[in-house]
């Protein structure tokens, strides 16, 4: 039970980190296009 909850929590944390990286890359690309 604890392992299952831990796995779900770990998956959520990884998903949040990946989403943040994707958003930062997307925003950076948009800013570069506007500044160029």
Image: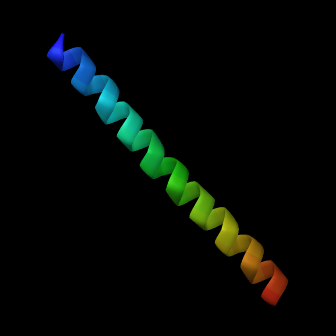
Residue drawn at point x = 17 percent, y = 18 percent? 3
| Foreground of the two, 32 or 4 | 4
- Residue 28 picture quarter: bottom right
Residue placed furthest toward the top: 1
Residue drawn at point x = 51 percent, y = 59 percent? 21
Q: Does residue 25 sit above or below 3 in this rendering? A: below
Location of residue 7 in the rendering, given as x and y in whole percent from the top left corner = 27, 25
- Count of marks overlaid on the render: 0
Residue drawn at point x = 46 percent, y = 45 percent? 16
- Residue 23 picture quarter: bottom right
Residue drawn at point x = 43 percent, y = 51 percent? 17
Location of residue 31 in the rendering, given as x and y in whole percent from the top left corner = 74, 79
Location of residue 6 in the rendering, given as x and y in whole percent from the top left corner = 23, 26
Q: Does residue 8 sit above or below 28 in this rendering? A: above
Q: Is residue 5 left or right of residue 20?
A: left
| Foreground of the two, 25 or 6 | 6
Residue placed furthest toward the bottom: 36
Quadrant placement of the C terminus: bottom right
Quadrant placement of the N terminus: top left
Q: Is residue 5 left or right of residue 24?
A: left
Location of residue 15 in the rendering, given as x and y in whole percent from the top left corner = 46, 40
Q: Does residue 33 sit above or below 10 in this rendering? A: below
Q: Does residue 13 sit above or below 3 in this rendering? A: below
Q: Is residue 34 left or right of residue 23?
A: right
């Amino acid at each position: 039970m604890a392992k299952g909850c831990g796995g779900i929590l770990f998956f959520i944390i990884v998903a949040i980190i990946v989403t943040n990286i994707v958003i930062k890359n997307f925003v950076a690309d948009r800013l570069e296009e506007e500044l160029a």
